[in-house]
Image (cartoon, grey):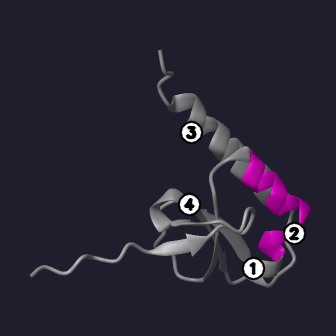
Amino acid sequence: MSRKKDIPVRKCVGTNERRQKAELLRIVRVEDQVIIDQTGELQGRGAYITPDVHAIKKAKKKHAFARALRMKLDEKIYDDLLELVNLVHMKEPMDE
C-alpha cells in the first residue's frame, strides 16, 4: 500500500486563510533586510501571503508583515508585492 504524501499548508498573513504552500508568496527577513522569496527556499524568518491585491492591502492595513517578521518595515515592500502581482496577472493569458 502506498502512503499519500502530505501537501504543505501555510496561513496567509493578509486573509488568515490556510492554503497550499505552492499557492502563496513568501516574504523573508534575512538579517535586517526583507526579501520577496519567489523560490520559497531562502533561509530566514518567513511569512506567506496570497498573491492577490485584496490580501496585500489587508496585510498592509493591519501591519501583518511587521508582526510576522518581528521587525519594523518600510511600506515599500507592499508596493513591491502589488507590482509583482500585477505583472504576473498581466502575463497570464486572457480567457476567451
Q: Return the disc, 4 or 1, that comes first in the chain's sequence.
A: 4
- Place of residue 54 in the rendered image (x, y in percent of width and height, measured from the top left): 76, 48
Q: Which of 25 and 33 is in front in this view?
A: 25
Name the residue carrying label 2. 63
Give the amino acid type for the residue marked by disc 2 in the picture. His
Q: Tell me: residue 2, above or below residue 57.
A: below
Disc 3 secondary structure class: helix
Based on the picture, tell me whether residue 57 belongs to the magenta stretch: yes
Looking at the rendered image, the disc whose residue lies closer to the viewer, 4 or 3, is 4
Give the amino acid type for the residue marked by disc 4 in the picture. Leu
Name the residue carrying label 3. 88
- Place of residue 36 in the rendered image (x, y in percent of width and height, measured from the top left): 62, 62
Residue at the spot 73% in from the left edge and 62% down from the top edge:
15
Q: Return the disc, 2 or 4, that comes first in the chain's sequence.
A: 4
Q: Given contact means CB atoms under 8 Å apart, are the residues at marks 4 and 3 in contact?
A: no
Name the residue carrying label 4. 24
